[in-house]
Image (tube, rainbow, N blue to C red):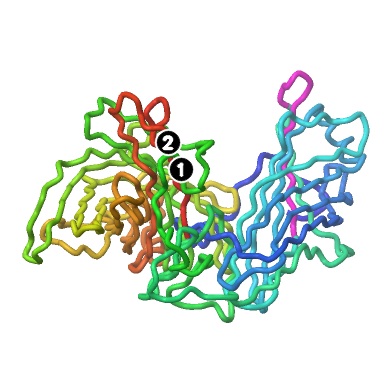
Amino acid sequence: MRGHRPALRTPRVRARGAAIAAFVALAPLISSAAAAVGTQVVSAKLPYDCALPSGQQRVAVRVQATFPGRATTGEAIRPTAVSTTVELPAPAVADLAALKATTVVPETRLSLDVAQHGAKAQALWRGTGAAPPVAVPAKGPLTLTTTGDAPTLTAAADGDLTVTATDLGIDLALAAAGGAPTAPASLSLDCTLAKDAAGHGLLATVPVGPATSTPAPGRSPSPSGPTAPASGRPTAPASPTDSVSPAGPGTPKGPTRPGAPAQEAGGGKDKDKAPKVGESRTGSSAARPPAPTCLKQNPTSKSLTAYITGYSNVRKLGGASLIPVSCVQIEQGDPQIAFPPDGNIHMLQKSEAYLDYQGRKQTPPFKSTFLTFGFTPTTATMVLEQAGPMTVASDVLLVLPDNIAETYVRAPLVLRVLDVEVNGTRLDVGPSCRTQTPLSSPEPDPATYPGPHLVMLGKGQLINGSDATGYLLTSGGPLTGEVTIPAFTGCGAGGEDLDRLLTASISGPGNYVKQIQGQTCAVAVELPTEGQCTEDHQPFVVPVPER
């Protein structure tokens, strides 16, 4: 709404047509942080014309954020240290006093244009005020500051990427003396950027160019980040961030690399090395990062627990989803010696496992935010639910002095969408929005393992007298695979069927997966080994997702 009289209301529901259109952006998509050289700190003071009960007033707004100095094509740029400070003039303070408000809690909604080569997308920076509520002074002005996370900006082509502030919404939760509610309980102000704003609201320009180096094809990934496999599968990104991706001329088609290569693979003998006892993937043994509870009830002598986390690409949308740190409960099988026709000696072990989050066989809920060109930012809360037994099949080739291990992890996982917000407004997808079947991967042994399921392979080596490298069940390491996202079903409420829309935009094959398992904890050991278990018998090592 634009005009001289504001609406006194709680934040209203936005246009449903736009919400349905934006739903095509729904996906477990979180792109990487950009590989940037230096930073640029933005502190822009912008004039806005806001509709107040007393009429239109000029409001001073300061927008602060930190952007990278430059970025690589196909990477993502995440603004950090984002804040919005609004200085309401004396007439606005008088309006609040007239409503008997003695304190306010602010929220802001800053709209932005993200542009490159004439293509443009819209992003939204939502900010909330810190506690306690802000006291309304006897007379103005009143300064309100909000902070919040900003969605990332993904540049699909070379050239300058510009970020420009446009409309601003200010939502004020009001309270009278003693915390009693006012009537109305909130005031929402619609503001437009003044025509005389310096720079017309331009906040930042980020130069985008090609990567300075590319990883050698066909080599194994380094601990700091995998290269895209020789098959051309995309690479998972580096950090859990949201994503805004303006599309336009020059946007690549087919598989893309949302992650940045770190150092070339094969650069050292510690490549893909499993963490040592007492050492996490970050190399620190002093502190254990926060992680979900991972306790085994009624453990046996063969019970293990471990954390796992990583990324799964969404090929259709050219990005990747962070799978959060999740607890895995493992019951080891008995090892067996086998003499197959190849004439070598093999040690085989088949273990069973399951995800555990608050007693349910699933990951913790995780959020993803994405914006395709021309749509509104859309955030979804999702979980991966285990739909059947998870198996861990290890085959160790006993060839002295090297013992070479291959481990296949197979898990039937259904992707369930729990909640959706479009531009901050909840979109009801119903209680049963999920993939029709579990995620599926190419299966090397379909006769033994029928049905759809995710398959991940870990390769490791145990050299006598030295540490293990790669993946082993007990020491952990990287697991990789490729997954097909099935069609969706049960999505929509109130007569709206969103199944085909979601399926057309997300479902499909060729999505590269990389997960990192941490060092296991032998739960039943009375005195756990230092660095492997906490004092209450949870896994000590919390792995870090790798590109």
Please give the residue where the numbered disc 1 appears in the rendered image: 279
Q: Relative to 120, is 253 on the left or the right?
A: left
Quarter occupied by residue 100:
top right
496 in relation to 202, above or below? above
Residue 265 visible at all: yes
Whether residue 180 appears in magenta in the rendering, the answer is yes
**Image location (x, y in percent) of residue 280:** 46, 44
Please state which of residues 442 and 406 is positioned toward the viewer in this rendering: 406
Residue, far top: 178
Compared to 372, does 217 lie above or below?
below
How far apart, in angstroms, are the residues tagged by discs 2 and 1?
7 Å
Would you say 474 lies left or right of 184 here? left
Estimate the x, y position of residue 81 in percent, counting from the top left. Answer: 71, 49
Q: Residue at x 52, y 43 (%)?
A: 284
Q: Nearer the viewer, residue 125 or 231?
A: 231
Q: Which mark is residue 531?
A: 2
Amino acid, disc 1: Glu
Q: Is residue 410 magenta?
A: no
Label 1 element class:
loop
Please state the extent of the stretch shown in magenta in the rendering. 166-181
Q: Secondary structure at mark 2?
A: loop
Amino acid, disc 2? Gly
Q: Is residue 104 left or right of residue 389?
A: right
Tell me the chief SS of the magenta region.
strand
Q: Position of residue 162 (x, y in %)?
A: 71, 69
For this rendering, which residue is in front, 171 or 159?
Answer: 159
Quadrant in the picture for residue 542 = top left
Could you classify mark 2 by the number of other residues whose Cα lies within 10 Å: few (under 14), some (14-19), or many (20 or more)?
some
**Is residue 26 among what the camera can see?**
no
Q: Earlier in the sequence, mark 2 or mark 1?
A: 1
